[in-house]
Image: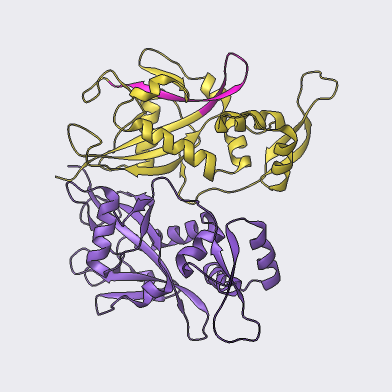
Chain colours: A yellow, B purple
């Protein structure tokens, strides 16, 4: 009997905390079955017999959370023989970033909720889902370029201050604005637009846009 | 019935071609069973019932080719419903780089051989193994830093000319030596040593070493 095969999806979005600072959050789903009944877990489920892996990721995410991000990226496949106490279970991790607007549009209830990546509840997740989240965070911190993160978490247009606030949330530390601006301008993944943030400031900040193309050729387009 | 689960491993190494230029090669194994009996395929095989995925990658690689690289990196999981004509088969791709010495130490026969990535035989591989190789090449070109590639393909010490020759093989084009040297020095992934290439030249070239640490936290250490 081959191992059972499932998909699990880590979706990060930005929410402001009580002090108004950007914080990384992710949606979790409460398990209604054993093993780990009652525990929070990543959205996911079994791969259908005639379904591609990416399609299974998109379908189970929509079924459990209502979320339909425009793309999913395969993260890593987790297959430790002991990761489930009841049967051999291999799960293919998927990963996506959604904008603040998409985070706000989610309906939360007793069985679906967003959690801060700093929430202690994350220490009691089902299976090895904490490890999957930690790996997704590592990948986000190390392998995604500035512009792509900005584009995906902040949307089409963003200020440098908004982008710095996202990086501070991601790295868990404050960044020097001048250094951050210098580093950013050394990359070619963002470009200045001729637009400025609306809001009536005396000197409204300039808006930037994503200028790169760095898409993985195997990224799953969920809009098909 | 869940899909059958296998591992497939892409190993790249350097071999000089007839003109003495570095070329990327990889080992393939001839299939002795249906489907695709007689076709060349990536080394691999089914995941054992009590075996981690990385251990299955290392074991099947050693069994089919004798190769024991010091690490394997998980590449991507391929699970298209139609990738095998006989049953649903999901394969977890692994990836490694080996040094020229390791390439030279392989015993080749009718059923195990190294092929250039430019060999036309690669168009007739079993399953979607050509696609897996193309993805591994893409990952190598885009996601691995200079120093790591040098370290893994060339060994502990290497000259800038050797490293440029590897990059030319990887990118399939000649690189300007001065530009390459400048780009390389802008990264901090290699460092000069106080040693020089042996061989009695009038001005022997300086040897460099890998100076980075950029290992993926989930890289499989196969030396355990």
Identify whether A102 is placed above or below B106: above
Q: Is residue A21 magenta?
A: yes
Between residues B223 and A91, which one lies in front from this camera angle? B223
Q: Is residue B168 magenta?
A: no
Residue at the extreme left of the image, as rendered:
A1
Q: Position of residue A41 (x, y in %)?
A: 34, 26
Q: Quadrant of residue B93?
A: bottom left
At a point 28% along the width and 49% down the height, the residue shown is B53
Between residues A7 and A132, which one lies in front from this camera angle? A132
Q: Quadrant of residue B72?
A: bottom left
At a point 73% along the width and 44% down the height, the residue shown is A185
Residue at the extreme right of the image, as rendered:
A202
Q: Quadrant of residue A89?
A: top left
Q: Position of residue B48 (x, y in %)?
A: 18, 51
Give the position of the N terminus of chain A as an image quadrant. top left
The answer to whether any part of residue A52 appears in the image is no
Q: Which residues are magenta?
A: A13-31
């Amino acid at each position: 009997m081959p191992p059972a095969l499932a998909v699990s999806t880590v979706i990060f979005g930005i929410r402001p905390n009580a002090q108004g600072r950007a914080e990384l959050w992710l949606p979790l789903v409460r398990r209604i079955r054993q093993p780990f009944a009652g525990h929070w877990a990543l959205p996911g489920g079994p791969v259908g017999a005639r379904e591609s892996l990416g399609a299974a990721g998109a379908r189970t995410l929509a079924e459990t959370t209502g979320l339909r991000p425009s793309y999913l990226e395969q993260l890593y496949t987790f297959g430790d023989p002991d990761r489930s106490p009841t049967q051999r279970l291999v799960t293919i991790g998927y990963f996506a970033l959604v904008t603040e607007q998409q985070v706000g549009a989610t309906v939360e209830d007793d069985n679906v909720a967003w959690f801060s990546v700093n929430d202690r509840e994350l220490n009691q997740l089902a299976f090895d889902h904490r490890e999957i989240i930690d790996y997704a965070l590592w990948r986000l911190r190390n392998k995604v370029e500035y512009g792509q993160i900005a584009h995906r978490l902040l949307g089409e247009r963003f200020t440098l201050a908004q982008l710095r606030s996202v990086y501070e949330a991601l790295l868990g530390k404050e960044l020097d604005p001048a250094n951050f601006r210098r580093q950013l301008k050394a990359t070619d993944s963002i470009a200045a637009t001729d637009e400025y943030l609306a809001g009536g400031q005396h000197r409204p900040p300039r808006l930037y846009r994503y200028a790169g193309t760095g898409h993985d050729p195997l990224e799953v387009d969920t809009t098909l």
